[in-house]
Image (spheres, rainbow, N blue to C red):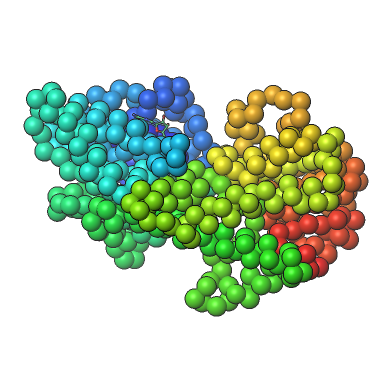
Amino acid sequence: MRITIFGTGYVGLVTGACLAQSGNHVVCVDIDADKIARLTQGEIPIFEPGLEQIVHDNVASGRLRFTTDAAEAVAHGTLQFIAVGTPPDEDGSADLQYVLKVAETIGEHMADYRLVITKSTVPVGTADKVREALGKALADRGGSVEFDVASNPEFLKEGAAVEDFMKPDRVVVGVDSDRAAEHLRALYAPFNRQHDRTIVMDIRSAELTKYAANIVLATKISLMNELSQVADRVDADIEQVRRAIGADHRIGYHFIYPGCGFGGSCFPKDVRALAQTAGKLGYDTEIINAVERVNDRQKRVLFDKLKAHFGDLAGKTIAVWGLAFKPNTDDMREAPSCTLMEALWDAGATVRAFDPEAMKEARRIYGERDDLVFCKNGEDAADGADALVLVTEWHIFRTPDFVDLATRMKQAVLVDGRNIYKPSYVAQAGFTYYGIGRSAAS
Ligand code: NAD
């Protein structure tokens, strides 16, 4: 099939590369000329395991191309995917300007039938707006060409995006015509393992499904983080509690890990956007609002623990392990590391930071500043520090030599933002240990 993808970010690039890998001819188009130039030269602008190889293989085979030329891109694909950003507006609603701009562009250039599929996460009702924007652009130039719109929300996880796309748990397809359903069933047929994973539904339900999925996951995290706050105050160990409640099949072990709050480009903005959608319709989403409030508070927990230990943080040096919002990505959007570092700087502390993939992104965000030292590895970051904070649970941070770390640091204080270390083991090396919700841990 001939496919066009608008937007070559985390979602668009992975979608384009994986669809090319299954034999389609794909054109990826972006307005960011620098990004397209880098991709054309074989440079992958994001870190995503396995992506580079697939991009290179499919560019070499001629099935994957990159362009900034929207007319050429619209001419190429019968299926036109919209995978551009939907960042939060000032009030937290999803900003649809990029999505609608693409719809308009398609309307300006299409010469025959096109199926326009929104993969970006968009509020319920956006397909109607896409149809309207495209139809208007088409009518403005006197064109009358048939088209369908569809919703195909993306569920990939950064850090495992290629794997998730290639082996999806489900593919959600929202359509209002048999023709659109058939195109999308055919496109996703190679990704069905053992049984058909494509769930076809009406467009509005598909649009809502994406928000519903992210909100259920975000709620599990905030609920567990709230319980960890209680555990801290009643001298219990949330990790023992987690192991016991997860054994109940109705609860399960997935997504009940307490930590220092969720970040990333999706959960925070999607939680806010759905609350906005409901609010505008006169419904106050009490649980969803609380998910965000609990998360905002939880992102302060690392700083609060440092503050409780040291009192005054002015002049202190804090080693920060992990800057990305989660392991296996270089994405720092809404990352807990940002909340921590900014609070530390406000308090007059210096940060010595290391992340295996996100250092470039951190430099882009914060630039060069005296109170941020970029280090070459975890040990280097710990040198001379008053405390070490584990923020992102990258594999390389899992089993450090704590005895060596204690000798490097000015004070052996460890704040474990992901509860990955065994408190008694760390204590043997001379550390004062603080975890999340585990004041009773040993
Ligand atoms: P991103 O910011 O990484 O990439 C968006 C890209 O779109 C940018 O390269 C930008 O230059 C490009 N763009 C903007 N306007 C354009 C236009 N008119 N024509 C062509 N390109 C244009 O975004 P992302 O993380 O890939 O997210 C894209 C969408 O997918 C969002 O709605 C997001 O909520 C959703 N989503 C993201 C993830 C994720 O893990 N990142 C997962 C599922 C869904």
From this view, report whether residue 71 is shown above or below residue 421: above
Using residue 263 as the reference point, say whether residue 190 is left or right of it. Answer: left
Q: Residue at x 72, y 25 (%)?
A: 369
Res 94 quadrant in image:
top left
Where residue 174 appears, as percent x and y from the top left, is 25, 53
Using residue 324 as the reference point, say whether residue 319 is left or right of it. Answer: right
From this view, report whether residue 304 is shown above or below residue 192: above
Using residue 230 as the reference point, say whether residue 207 is left or right of it. Answer: left
Q: Residue at x 30, y 30 (%)?
A: 101
Where residue 235 appears, as percent x and y from the top left, is 77, 69
Residue 35 visible in image: yes
Where residue 30 appears, as percent x and y from the top left, is 37, 28
Q: How many marks?
A: 0
Q: Residue furthest bottom?
A: 248
Residue 191 visible in image: no
Q: In front: 390, or 76?
A: 390
Q: In front: 328, or 410?
A: 410
Where residue 91 appears, as percent x and y from the top left, is 44, 40
Res 27 quadrant in image:
top left
Q: Residue furthest front?
A: 282
Q: Residue at x 86, y 56 (%)?
A: 432
Ligand 1 falls in which quarter?
A: top left
Q: In front: 66, or 109?
A: 109
From this view, report whether residue 248 is shown above or below residue 170: below
On-image quarter of the C terminus: bottom right
Q: In front: 169, or 439?
A: 439
On-image quarter of the N terminus: top left
Q: Residue at x 20, y 39 (%)?
A: 131
